[in-house]
Image (cartoon, rainbow, N blue to C red):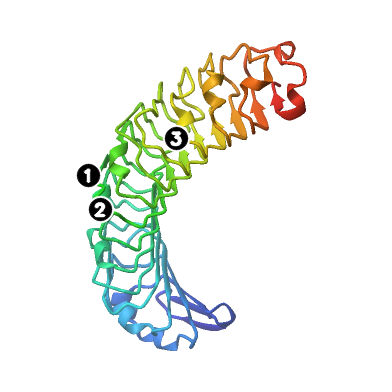
Amino acid sequence: MLLRASAQGLKFCCNEPDSRCTIEEWNPSEEGYFFLNHMPNGTHVIKIVNLQNVLLEAKLCSTVVQFVNSLSVENSPKLGIVIIPATCTIETLIMFKTGVRIIHFEKNSAIISVTIRNSPITNIPATLLTLPAIQHILLEYTKIASIDLSWFYPLKGLATLKLVKSNLQVVHGEGSTNVTTGLNVINLSYNSLRALNLNGFAPFAELTQLVLAHNKLESLTGALNIPALTGLMLNHNRLKQLDACQWNDTQRLQGITLAHNYLRQVPACLERFASLAHVDLNHNRIGYVRWEDLQQLPKLASIDLSFNRITAIPADQAQYPPLLKQLDLCGNPIGVVTIPDGLNDSIHVTVV
């Protein structure tokens, strides 16, 4: 353990077994950077807590040893501007509970992950485009109100984009299929989206997870055209109807979640998605189910229709999907007496 302290309150603590150094109550303009020369060899992580300066400048990266690969700044409300130079060798940058409004990245081929949480930042930092190696972007609890999906096209290595629990109200996108990206996950949950054009996601041909849960979505327009998509999360919105008939055949789609919406019927044309195995429609207003459509789903294993307005289910077991194993009907005005004899032998039906 190495410990340095100054009369001004600076605390500098390094734990060599953990390869981690923590700096607290640091004011670079008063205390300078000299103490960083005492950082042990093999330090991989620097955590700065309650930085006493509005600016975190490039000098930090030029001072710390080259083997540091993670920089975290936490609980620093005074910090408003961050500058990351081209010479910085960190791979991971984390900003948590800061006053950061501006982050400037010089062209940097080392940074892989950027996380900004609990920040008053209002725009996605434009200079993220200067990070060719970036793979993960997480923006949480920010003031960002709009996002242009086409802005991320140049970031060919980007795998996950999460803009969550923020103020997002508008999503723009060109929808051109002439451009492709390697994004695997887009998560825009816990925002304030009311309307969305699905065409904007067309360039993300390798996307496997699209998370739009916990918004205020009332309408979805355009066609879903993402051939690699396996999971679509639309739960906790305000959708009254959903028509999948104009969507391209997404043969890999395995699960769709539409719980806690205002749907009055099962979305049309779900039978077009041959790999669909799980459908969650609990807490809607569905009163009638076209079982003959769902019967065409050869891999459907579970469907949750709990807390809807369904009064009866088919008496003929042959009307159900061939591989159905779980049917949840809890909270519906349906009696046990209406469940066909023998149905529970092959399908686990839950009504209470």
The amino acid on which the numbered mark 3 sits, given as a three-letter code, is: Leu
Q: Is residue 126 left or right of residue 343?
A: left
Residue 21 to residue 230: above or below:
below
Residue at image point 58% right, 37% down:
299
Residue at image point 35% right, 49% down:
142
Give the image quarter of residue 318.
top right
Q: Residues within 10 Å of mark 1 (few under 14, many from 20)?
A: some
Residue closer to the observer: 154 or 72: 154
Residue 194 to residue 163: above or below:
above
The residue to which callout 2 is attached is: 179
User: In the rendering, at what x and y percent does residue 16 appear?
Assistant: 56, 82
Residue closer to the observer: 338 or 36: 338
Q: Let me know if residue 64 appears in the view.
A: yes
Q: Are marks 2 and 1 in contact (CB under 8 Å)?
A: yes
User: In the rendering, at what x and y percent does residue 50 appear?
Assistant: 41, 65
Number of labels in the image equals: 3
Residue at image point 44% right, 88% down:
38
Q: Is residue 44 left or right of residue 116?
A: right
Residue closer to the observer: 204 or 148: 204
For mark 1, give the secondary structure: loop
The residue to which callout 1 is attached is: 174
Q: Nearer the viewer, mark 3 or mark 2?
A: 2
User: In the rendering, at what x and y percent does residue 7 appear?
Assistant: 42, 78
**Disc 2 and disc 1: Cα gap in Å?**
10 Å
Which numbered disc flags the more N-terminal residue, 3 or 2?
Answer: 2
Residue 166 to residue 71: above or below:
above
User: In the rendering, at what x and y percent does residue 239 appear?
Assistant: 40, 25
The amino acid on which the numbered mark 2 sits, given as a three-letter code, is: Val
**Res. 234 mark:** 3
**Disc 1 and disc 3: Cα gap in Å?**
22 Å
For mark 3, give the secondary structure: loop
Quadrant of the drawing holding the C terminus:
top right
